[in-house]
Amino acid sequence: KPFNAHELLARVNTHLTLDQLRRSLAAKNAELARAHELVRRAFGRYVSEEVAESLLRTPEALELGGEEREVTILMSDLRGFTAMAARLSPHEVIEVLNLYLENMVDVISRYEGTIDEIIGDAILVIFGAPVRSEDHAEKAIACGLAMQLAMAEVNRRLSEKGATGLEMGIGIHTGRVIVGNIGSLRRTKYAAVGS
């Protein structure tokens, strides 16, 4: 069959253009996926992984307010930390805190706790929100025990550095709270509010 050179050239150009568009879209999708992962990881360092995932999945979760739910709250802090911090340089205090928190954050994540706040040497953890869990109280108690056991490793590492050992206290309570976002449109925080 005879061919039209102009038609053939137009078809080849169209095919090449579509192929370039497909490659460009694939590259853009890969770039978006990398950006999404970077945001999730960076955001996950400031809020829990669960909260970060929830917000990236459903942006309406950013709205202020929440829902009433039964959860278990765990609060831990170091005994005598203020007096110890007064004796150490700020650099030494940060080193001790980071060593302690590194161990505790690992334990808390194993028991599916959501770290709501790190306030100096204190850690406030929610079990049962934002991810629902029927056994939130059991997870919180098991986590508290594991945190106490993990203090042996923290103190071993502190001893290797010539630092004094630490003691940790933990309080755990189960009750009904409102879980969700509090604050303003400029600054919002995921929290549990209740007695």
Image: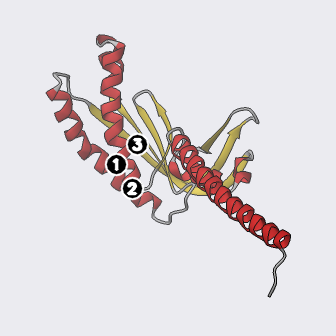
Name the residue located 63 percent from the left edge and 59 percent from the top edge.
26
Q: Which class describes the residues within 10 Å of circle 3: few (<14), some (14-19), or many (20+)?
A: few
* CA gap, disc 3 and disc 2: 16 Å
Residue at mark 2? 111
Foreground of the two, 51 or 44: 44
Q: Which mark is residue 107?
A: 1
| Amino acid of disc 2 | Tyr
Name the residue located 63 percent from the left edge and 56 percent from the top edge.
29
Element type where label 3 sits in the image: strand
x and y percentages locating residue 118 in the rendered image: 47, 34
Q: Which class describes the residues within 10 Å of circle 1: few (<14), some (14-19), or many (20+)?
A: many
Q: Quadrant of the N terminus?
A: bottom right
| Amino acid of disc 1 | Val
| Amino acid of disc 3 | Gly
> Looking at the image, is mark 3 or mark 2 earlier in the sequence?
2
Foreground of the two, 175 or 81: 81
**Residue closest to the far bottom:** 1
Quick check: 125 above or below 93? below
Name the residue located 53 percent from the left edge and 38 percent from the top edge.
46
Quick check: 1 above or below 68? below
Q: Count the marks.
A: 3
Residue at mark 3? 171
Confirm whether residue 176 shows in the render. Answer: no
Q: Quadrant of residue 165?
A: top left
Mark 1 vs mark 3, foreground winner is 1
Foreground of the two, 108 or 145: 108
x and y percentages locating residue 156 in the rendered image: 16, 35
> Looking at the image, is mark 1 or mark 3 earlier in the sequence?
1
x and y percentages locating residue 191 in the rendered image: 60, 43
Contact between labelled residues 2 and 1, with CB atoms less than 8 Å apart: yes
Q: Which class describes the residues within 10 Å of circle 2: few (<14), some (14-19), or many (20+)?
A: some
